Amino acid sequence: MSDDAAAAVPHTARRADDDLRPPPIGLLPLFLRFLRFGALAFGGPVAQIAMVRHELVERDRWMSSARFNRLLAVMQALPGPEAHELCVHMGVRARGRIGGLLAGLGFMMPGFLLMLAAAWAWFRFDVGQGALAAALLGAQAAVIGLIARAVERIGRHILVARSLWLVAGLSLPATLAGAPFWIVLPAGAAIHGLAATGRRGAALAALLGAAAVAVLWLLRPAAPAAVDVLAAAAPATVLALFLTGLKAGLLTFGGAYTAIPFVRADVVPRGWMSDATFLDGVVLANVMPAPLVIFGTFAGYAAGGFPGALAVTAGVFLPAFAFSMILHDRLEQVVGIPAVHAVLDGIAGAVVGIIAATVLQLAAGLAGQGTGWPLLAIGGLALVAAWTLKGRFAAPLILAVAAAAGQLWLA
């Protein structure tokens, strides 16, 4: 609604509309309702949010459409899977914090259980090898194309200022060069946060300071070979996997695809799994009714079995629960502060560059398997298909066709 249109609506009418509340509902029916949402959560966040909006806002009037739009804008500014965060928020409105917990658990439960079962079968029967190996290569190439499409889609919504383009453009080569996220993300937050509030000289100083820190980090004395080996061979403890998931949950801005580089940066270089196995998890997540970040469950299982799967999943989803349950009454006010919003936008801009770098790293790893032009063709065609096809089943269809093509060309 425009400002003029909003002004034309009487204040009391807007107030009454914003005061819409969910009807009385028991805890078990609340859980079952969001469990149903989770079982039907195909098609990514757009389809998931549309489903929640249709049933709870347009049909059952749990919240006004205007308030839902404001809430969605807040969730998109915060890290974490926004569809899950919306469900937690709706549950809090219906039955308080216990309602938010049950709504969030219900929404994530179908995807979590399916991914846990798929991960068990994957490694129990060694699905990644043997007769299906060629099909999986095709699907892996296609999922890289889907991630590349996600970079454009996420960037279109996030990179709305020149300073954000600068942040993303610098984050890409910095990540490829080996600069860690704890340099890249604060730099993005500072550069855009200062530029957006008119302090361009300070933003330039932040840029130069971040560049100096990155160069010093990249030129640091190399660790002894024995230390590198020990670091790479560090065990995948439950705590380490929980922290991996927590980092992804806290840094997932603009969509679940942005969690991919942060999980990969922990599990692949440490030798807990290969890039190919990691991509297999992303492939599975794209065909399941769940937020895409459920691929973390697969990564956790690959690295640490059932305890590892629980640890990564808990870490990924903890921020989504916490933001909506703890800050329920303050989200709109806090994120509406210009300085806070600018900092969050700067982090999101840096994440766009990081995920673009991860696409190149994954593509290089897949190309290194020596399968030549067929994989390049499959990935390119998947990118074109992702650009043109719409609907909640577009990604599963693309992956299925790519798997068939891989079986045909690469077997």
Image (spheres, helix red, strand yellow):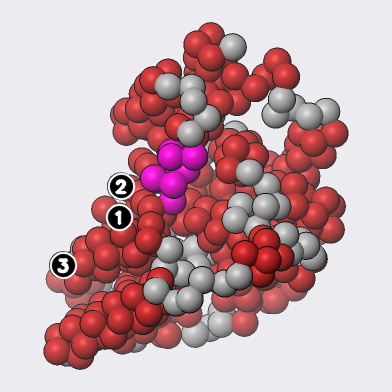
> Residue 250: x, y in percent?
54, 71
For label 3, the SS is helix
The residue where tag 3 is placed is: 162
At label 1, counting other C-alpha atoms closer than 10 Å, the crowd grade (few under 14, some 14-19, many 20 or more) is many
The residue where tag 2 is placed is: 152
Residue type, mark 2 in image:
Glu
> Residue 213: x, y in percent?
36, 81
- Contact (Cβ within 8 Å) of mark 1 with mark 3: no
Name the one closer to the observer, 123 or 25.
123
**Residue in the image at 63% along x and 48% along y:** 295
**Residue in the image at 71% along x and 25% along y:** 129
Q: CA distance from mark 1 to mark 2?
A: 5 Å
Residue type, mark 3 in image:
Arg
The residue where tag 1 is placed is: 155
> Residue 61: x, y in percent?
51, 59
For label 1, the SS is helix
